[in-house]
Every structure is written in structure tokens, then in C-alpha cells.
Image: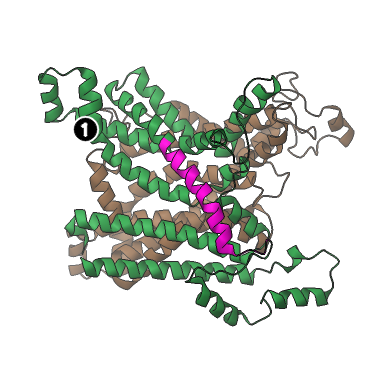
Chain colours: A green, B brown
Amino acid sequence: MQRYILFRILQAVVALWMLSTVVFFILHVTGDPVAYLLPPDATAGQEEDLRRSLGLDRPLYVQYGIFMGNAWTGDFGKSTTKGTLALDLLLERLPNTIQLALASIAFCIFIGLPLGVIAAIKKDSIWDTVAKFIALAGQSAPQFWLAILLIILLGAMPAERGLPALPTFGKGGIEHLILPTVVLGWSIMAGVVRLTRSAMLEVLDSEYVKFARVKGLSERMVVWKHAAKNAVIPVLTFSGLALGGLLNGSVVVEVVFAWPGVGRMLLDGVVQRDFPVVEAAILASGVFYISLALLVDILYAYADPRIRL
Amino acid sequence: MATRVEAVGTALGRVSRLWRRPARRGARIPYVPSAIVGLLLFCAIFANVISPHHPRGADETQRERVVKTLVPPFQSWDNILGTDRKGLDILSRMIHGARTSAIISLIALGSGVTVGTVLGLVAGYRGGWVDAVIMRLVDAALAFPLILVALLIVVVLGPGIQNIILAIAATVWARFARQVRGEVLSLKGREFVTLAKIAGVPEHQIIIKHIFPNVVNTLLIVISLQVGQVILTEASLSFLGLGLPPGDPAWGIMVAEGRNFVIDAWWMSLFPGIAITMVVLAFNFFGDWLRDTLDPKLRRI
């Protein structure tokens, strides 16, 4: 078991190294930030000076060596556009992305779980169909379009008529969180509803639920206390994996709602060819994804010894 | 990796009856989704013939278009879904947008599926370090944000439909590789493969003739469930202004163009958004149905 875990950790480290190397070379081979930073009438000498001060005049392998030597300590260098350390920028943005991700998962479970339970106990009825439609609609509607619709309906239109309206951009109080949360949470709700429904169907059919019924418990107790409690487990597994995806920052939602998260930082970084920022953001998302995959692998290896082949 | 997928499978497999009704195996074809997919394909193929106007307004003079900027929908037969800021017909642009979506998803998925399947077959069958390398590549590809891939490709190659296709194909292959590899792992221990080996069938023949046909069903299902995802991705990239040049008839671009005029010209964003939603919804329903019909075991995907 220990050997298996060690081996998987080693693989994860190799994957991260590959990721950072690929990002480094793609970024550096495809151009530099000089054209973006200087005014269009800058002379070739000015460009040279800037390149030298950014360390971009050295041979690529030297730059790569410096990058690798510093990157594993979390030092990606200074942002070429903002002048602050890329890591600091990342750490400044990360809490916002985490906040939005947690809120979205919470919203998703809060709505999706009851929907799934209702779909299961009213199987094949109109409720089942309605739940399925709500879930699939969130999965199928593009996030940016959903966002625009909500901005019109809950933000712009009420504001125009002087009614209380939700803020539609930026970060502020809790009310700023509502619209992005709904859009992001709804888009991953289908999985939760689906899993809850099927888990409930399974559980409702089991012996102990039948026994609870025989015991004369009210239907509400049977469904919500005895059955739903056990149907939650696969939903939690799914939510954990979904959270990993959300922590990478949802570029579309962050752009539409001007949410200052990691996703937008990445987008801006690439557009402005801000190498340190892009490298930091990609590595962070790689660490999230790969360590989550690693965690799941190890947990399942504990649960099921057959996997450790 | 497949170990994880399989483990999730066994954990969820027991409980995942998903949307299937008890005895719905081989349920009837979902008519509405099929009709929507059919309409999409029809529009894509005959876009030039059926759209009332040119998507970039080449059929009218500048002056003719200026007169009818921002015509609301359902006011005239000529522009049934209204016009945009430049006086271009929304319906015509949407019909051509269907063509854009269809071309992008067809080619991107086609190449992604091919590469992913080949790598998945090899990784699963060979095992060992080949498998480890390919699967770590898959991990890296899945951890690589699609937006970045798209942006870099656009920066290097310039905007254009072929670059957005490249960007989507470069990320979508990993899903297929992972799925196929998982299938192959369970197939290669089966008797017919062992017998083929004993009979001296060369390796590539075993993979092509004995293992691949058994993966096709799964592949079809994953493809049908991925189409919607690819269309959404294409629309999102277009919306963010990555990939397709502005002004191209694509649904994502149309929503983005209408974004700043949603109060006064709601139709500019509304109709293309509905089109994306309907098409993706149709593909998701269709994929669900295909999964239930072809392989009920696969409900976890």
C-alpha cells in the first residue's frame, strides 16, 4: 500500500513537472510581453532594454533552468504588467475563486438533492420529468447566456423600474455572490440530481426501508431520515470531484460577472502575455486537479484492495 | 486511471439507475431531440439555400441595411427574428451559426476521437510504462485549462475556424483515451483475447480485430454525450472572443454581440442562446437514450 501511494505521488509530481514545462515552452516560444508593454512607437533599443530587464534576452534553456529552480518554491517571478509577485496575485485571487466554488457546490446540493429525492419518490410522474428538465436545462444552457438572462431579469430590469435589484458585477457583499453562484451551481446540478435519484431508488427498495415502513413510521420520516441519509454518499463523492473542477476558476462566469477570481486572472495573463501570472495560475489548477485525482485514487485503493495491482 | 474510473463505477454502478424507467430498455427513439438534431444538420448543410439573407449582409447595400438596424422580431416577414446593430438578419446568422457549430464539432470530435481511441487502445493493451506515460499525458491534458490552449493557439496561428477546432481536439482526446483504456483493461483479460494470443495472432491484429469492435458501443455513447459539451465549449470560446474572428456567424459571438444591448435589443442574445440550449439539450437527451439502449451498464458516464 505504501509503495502504491509513493508510486502515485511520484507520478503526480512528474505530471506537474510535464505540465509546467509544456506551459513554459509554449509561452516562451510563442512570443514575449514586450510588444504588449511598450507603446507602439517604441524603438528597438527600448524593446531590447525591457527584454533584458525581464530576463527574456537569455537563451531559452537558461530561462527554463531559472524558472524550474524557483518554481518549486512557489516563486514564479514578478508579474510583468502589475509588478507584484505572481504568487501574491494568485493568493489574492484564490480566496474569491474558492468562495464562489464553495457557494456553487452548496447551492447545487441544496437544490439538487431535494429535486433528486422528489424525482425518486414520485418516479415516472410529472415531478420526475420536471426535476429532470431543471437539471438538464442547467447542464445544456451556456453559462454566459444564463448569466445574461439572469442579469436582465434580476438586475437590469428591476433596477430600471426602481425595484430592489441584485448587483450584476464585481465582488462585494453576499448579494454579489448570488447570481454567479446560481449560474455555476445550476450548470453542475444535473449530476447531483441524477445520482440522488438513482441512489434513492436503490435505497427505497432495500430491506431496512421496508422495515421502517412496516414499523409504522410516517412516510416523511422514512424518505428524508432513513433513505435520503444513505443516498447522500455518492452525491458527496461527485460533489468533491466537481469542487476540484470549480477551484480551477470558471473563466466564463468570472468574466461575465467581473468576478476577481483565478479564471479571469489566467485569461488576462494570457492576453497580456504575463508569463509569471499564467504559469502560477496553471500550476495552481494543475496542483488542484492532480492532487484531487491522487486523493481519489488512494481512497479507492484503501476501500478496494483489488485496485492495487 | 481506469482503476479510479472503475472504482467510481463500482461505487456508483450499484446505485446508478439514472433516468431509466424500469422496463425501458430499448425505449423508443426520442423524437423531439432527434428532430432538433436533424434540423441542425439540415440548416448546416443547406445554410446557403434556406437562409433568407446573407449572414454578413452581402446581399444588400450598406444603405439598405442601415435603414433596418435593430428591427424587433416578429415585425416583418423579411427579418422574422429581427436584425442586429448592423442591420444583419438574425435568423440568417443563426442558420449559418448552425453550420459553424456543426463543422467545428464534427472535425474536432472526429480527430479527438481518433487520437484518443488509438492512444487508449495502446495504453490499455500494452500496460506498463507505455500506459503510465499515456495516462499521465491524459492527466496533464485534463488539467490544462481549455481556455489557455485556445488562447495560445489563437496567438500563434491567428484567429480562424481551424484553430478553434485544433484547440477543442487538443483537449477532448483525453476523455476518449481514458474511457477506451478502461474498457480495454477489462477486455484484455477475457478468453477470446487469450485464445487469439495463443493462436498466434499478431498484436496489432488483436487490437484492431478483437478488442476495438468491443469498444465501439462505448465510444458511440461517449461521443453522443460529448457533442453537447463540444458545442458548449465552442460557443463559450466564441463568446470570450477566442478563436473565431469577430463578425463570423457563430452563436457564441452573436450572444456576445448582443450582450451590451440586452435591455433594448434583447432578441440579439436571446435567440442564439435558445438555439445553443436546444441543440445541447437534444444531444444530451439523445446520448442518454443511446446509453440506455446500447449499454445499460454504462449509466455512470
The picture quadrant where one finds residue B231 is top right
Does the magenta segment cover residue A100?
Answer: yes
Residue found at the very far front of the displayed protein? A173
Q: Nearer the viewer, residue B3 or B278?
A: B3
Q: Nearer the viewer, residue B46 or A6?
A: A6
Quick check: B236 left or right of A8? right
Residue at the (63%, 72%) spot, across then down: A29
Residue A39 spot, x, y in % from top left: 82, 63
Residue designated by label 1 = A202
Residue at the (38%, 69%) spot, across then down: B133
Q: Is residue B47 something one can see in this rendering?
A: no
Q: Residues within 10 Å of mark 1 (few under 14, many from 20)?
A: some
What range is drawn magenta here?
A: A82-106
Residue A250 spot, x, y in % from top left: 53, 47
Looking at the picture, does residue A86 appear above or below residue B40? below
Residue at the (83%, 64%) spot, across then down: A40
Amino acid type at circle 1 is Glu
Residue found at the very far right of the displayed protein? B63
Looking at the picture, does residue A136 appear above or below residue A7? above
Quick check: A39 left or right of B269? right
Q: Nearer the viewer, residue A177 or A17?
A: A177
The chain letter for the residue carrying disc 1 is A
Residue A268 spot, x, y in % from top left: 64, 55
Does the magenta segment cover residue B65?
Answer: no
Residue B230 spot, x, y in % from top left: 51, 46
